[in-house]
Amino acid sequence: MISALAPLGLKIVAVANQKGGVGKTVTAATLASGLARRGQRVLLVDGDPQGNLSLLFGAEDRKPELGALLEMLSKDGAEDRVEDGIDTDSVSASKPGRRKVNVDEFFAKRVKLRMDMLPLGHRRLRTELGDGRLEEAEKPFANLLQKLKTRYDWILMDTSPSNGVLERLLISASEAVIVPLEFQVFSVSGLEAILDDISRCAERAGHDIKARALIFTKAENGLARVDTYRKVFSSFNIPIFEVCKSEYVPRALERGRTLWEAAPASYVARDYSRILDKVFLG
Amino acid sequence: MAKRAEKSDVRERITKKLGENTQGPGAGYSVSSAVSDPLKRKLRGRWMVIEHLVGEEEYLARFVSRALRDMEIEGEEYTAEYEFREFICLKRVGIQATILGEAGSTEYFYRLRVASVWDLEGSGFLSIRPEMGYQCTELAGETAAVKDLDEPPEPVIVAFRFEGDSLILEEGDDYKRLERIT
């Protein structure tokens, strides 16, 4: 039996894999918008400086965004400001005379019904902010998301194909990780790397973070040795879901629509729907 | 050879890490609905068991040797049917025989009915979880014993495949070949 996230109270979910092109952004967008369509309040965090997720939801020019939030959180006294303010939807100053910053300023509101977004369109975020500042923002950002759990049923985070400080920050702030993988046997070695990262992040964060599901995106039944892949991965002790390769996905993205809007009855939508049922909602 | 060993090491390490990092056993593998839906459609309908072996032994012979041991019997017959609906699988089994005795013959009839929830499990496997059912024995047309299914057991994982028009179900050394009725 799969233990769903909702009954476990695990609501902050990172979609992560160091490898590129495995469908992280599509998966994050589809799961987040799918949850919102099911009546859940969702905050979607674009954690990939490429900003594709922000582009998809028309929030690419939104300022300030995640980069600005992290910059602010990295400053002295930021943790106090988060601790003090977020219960009233604002980040308050710890020192007299410092401006109160409402966290909503950073959000693109209602990018979809019941769905807000924390966009990122800052391609040079890493170089401009630097590892040191990102590291300083790590704990305040995690605290902020914890506070936001009172406002959202789910906080989903897309991450970039890297294992730098930004990705560590996002995974450390999460409570569960969903790992999209390419549907091929070489994914095994990439999987090992991301599992190691998750362990390290959990250790740093001082709380339990686990990979809760693997998603084989772009699954094709016609591939040679497909049964071998399935047998190999079936032996792993984690829920694994195939999401079929589909032309509906790029078509929907090109038109700036979610899969639920473009092709709700497609096999690929059904595959994602099953993940929502089994992994998220239970 | 070395490469193969290396791959196997990676698998072992991941299995270990997943054991430490994830939620526990019985997680499952869900094939895409693009694969599972056509297979489910192919499975739907009524199927009759035309061959049933346990190891090398015919199931009927094995049943008789256990349930009707030390009895002289004749005319034993076995029918078994699986009906796959959208989510439910109905299993119907009937075994009849004539028990020969000094005072005359007695008709024996055994009936099993089980309704299970089923789904595809990974590649080439069915997960079948019995939900309700009973088994009943009749002697000379009178009910001799009835037993309800106990608490629903854990799902049974059954390997399946299609061979021509036949459906093959295998669970351990239990082998069934079925043909479609409808």
Image (cartoon, grey):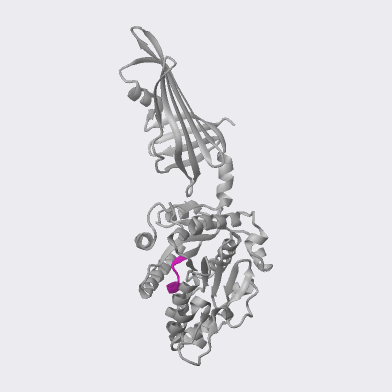
Magenta stretch: includes residue A175: yes
User: In this picture, is A28 found above or below A64?
Assistant: above
Q: Is residue A168 above or below residue B174?
A: below
Residue A138 at x, y percent in the picture: 44, 79
Q: Position of residue B137 (x, y in %)?
A: 40, 22
Q: Residue furthest bottom?
A: A97
Residue at 51% x, 74% y is: A160
Magenta-drawn segment: A171-177
Residue A162: image x %, image y %?
Answer: 48, 75
Q: Is residue B61 above or below residue A176?
A: above
Q: Quadrant of residue B14?
A: bottom left
| Looking at the image, residue B105 lies above or below residue A67 | above
Q: Position of residue B93 (x, y in %)?
A: 46, 28
Q: Is residue A106 magenta?
A: no
The reply, left or right, for residue B142 in relation to residue B42 is left
Left or right position of A20 against A199: right
Residue nearest the viewer, comparing A108 with B19: A108
> Which quarter of the picture shows residue B105?
top left
